[in-house]
Image (spheres, grey):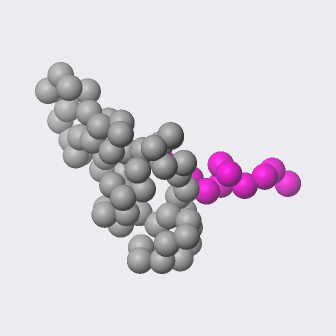
Amino acid sequence: MLGSFSRTAGDGTQTAGTGKTAAEIETSGTLLEAGRDFVEETANGTENIWWILEGLDYPRPLWELLPEN
């Protein structure tokens, strides 16, 4: 779901992607730098694909926030 990011396991077995700590993944800045399009920012596009509760949860696709019809 997070593209080239994966949570750092700390055991040295990771073989692909860029390891990030949970704290790093729980901030929009980490993913904004990678070009992800978040709600309320336009530098990475205007489609608003991702949203986040800064420091409390991982980024989630916007459709998870939208109410069901």
Regarding residue 61, the answer to whether it shows in the image is: yes
Q: Position of residue 67 (x, y in %)?
A: 78, 52
Tell me what residue is drawn at x 36 percent, y 36 percent: 22
Q: Residue furthest left?
A: 12
Q: Is residue 46 above or below residue 32?
A: below
Tell me what residue is drawn at x 27 percent, y 41 percent: 20
Tell me what residue is drawn at x 50 percent, y 64 percent: 38
Q: How many marks?
A: 0
Based on the picture, tell me whether residue 63 belongs to the magenta stretch: yes
State the residue in front, 56 or 17: 56
Question: In the image, is 24 to the left or to the right of 63?
Answer: left
State the residue in front, 41 or 63: 41
Tell me what residue is drawn at x 36 percent, y 58 percent: 29
Q: Position of residue 57 (x, y in %)?
A: 50, 40
State the residue in front, 38 or 17: 38
Q: Position of residue 19 (x, y in %)?
A: 23, 40
Based on the picture, tell me whether residue 2 belongs to the magenta stretch: no
Q: Quadrant of the C terminus?
A: bottom right
Q: Residue furthest right?
A: 69
Regarding residue 60, the answer to whether it shows in the image is: no
Q: Position of residue 31 (x, y in %)?
A: 37, 57
Picture quadrant where residue 26 is located: top left
What span is in magenta?
Answer: 59-69
Q: Residue furthest top?
A: 11
